[in-house]
Amino acid sequence: MNLYYEGSDGTIIDFMSGPLAAQEPESLASSKWSYSTISGVNGLGKVKRFFKNTEEAKLKVMVLADDAEEFNSVMYRMHRTFDRDVRQMKPGKLWWNGFYKEVFAVETENGSFEELMESVERTITFLSVYPYWIRKSTFQYLSYTGVTGTLDYPLDYGFDYDQSEFIETITNDCIDAANFEIIFHGPCIDPDVTVGEHTYALYVTLNDGEYAVIDSKTKKITKYSITGEAENVFYLRDKENYIFEKIPEGNTTILRSKDLGVDISIFDERGEPDWI
């Protein structure tokens, strides 16, 4: 399996290779729903809502280095990476076979240090304020500007689609409606895309090389210039349609101007990741 920590600065701490070996990693995959109840008729209670609280999970890691230099290097690397994210209030990502959970490493405990073997068993406590395992799937809908005639279907089924007849779809195979990230690519004016029966639109002008991002999880809408400068354009959203409406489960049609480039990412959020 793949199991590693990705710091907010991109540093990778691989718990399954080199001098590090995760012990009983299945402890990270535990899942728990919290709930609130209310009194019902005749004193019978009922569940008002289910939700996930902030969670902690512990991972035991055996550090077994070839020499003192390697041992000190890996221990310092872990400490620097974990503490940097905590001090800067930027969560790292704990990756498990293609899924990640945003976490902070808030505690480390060390067992007996074996100097002759340059080894120690370290227990790391991870704190997650949004305790979901997440897998991101991105669907790209390219601009067809300048394309004429028919479009070749990616697999040879013996027929072509005319642009006017080409049907685009998006597949959400998550358990329920999903959080998303929509990216509109410039050049364009007032871009919009309709997913199923819901429209996502911005009243913004994007030049060539610029793009705008709608993030339903963070509830932010940001425009990026060609030089990477970020601008909050939340106020330029279409106020007639809820801009953060989740993408419905299943296979859904996409409607957009064919000269508009759009990326739509779906976030599969689960209580536990795929085990294999």
Image (cartoon, rainbow, N blue to C red):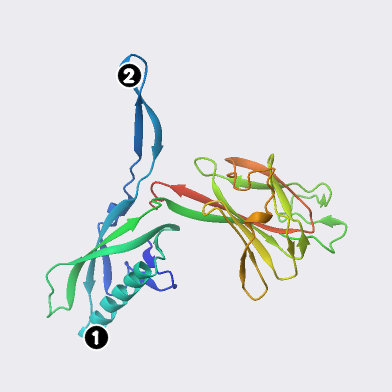
Q: Position of residue 270 (x, y in %)?
A: 43, 47
Q: Tell me the kind of residue under disc 1.
A: Glu
Going by the picture, which residue comes out furthest to the right? Answer: 149
Q: Which residue is mark 1?
A: 69
- Most distant residue in the top direction: 42
The answer to whether residue 4 shows anywhere in this view is yes
The quarter holding residue 63 reads bottom left
Q: Amino acid at mark 2?
A: Leu
- How many labels, in total? 2
User: Residue at 17% across / 78% down in the picture?
Assistant: 118
Percent of width and height locating residue 227? 65, 76
Q: Nearer the viewer, mark 2 or mark 1?
A: 2
Name the residue at the front extreme: 235
Decide: few, some or many residues near mark 2? Use Cα within 10 Å; few <14, some 14-19, many ≥20: few
Measured along the vertical axis of the image, is residue 166 above or below residue 208?
A: above
- Identified at 56% across, 55% down, the residue is 137
Q: Is residue 158 left or right of residue 61?
A: right
| Mark 2, residue position | 44
Of 115 and 241, nearer the camera is 241
Q: Position of residue 103 (x, y in %)?
A: 37, 60
Q: Residue furthest bottom?
A: 69
For the residues labelled 2 and 1, the Cα–Cα distance comes to: 64 Å
Q: Which mark is residue 217?
A: none
In the image, what residue occupies the spot 29% across and 53% down?
Answer: 56
Helix, strand or loop status at disc 1: helix
Q: Residue at x 34, y 50 (%)?
A: 54
SS for callout 2: loop
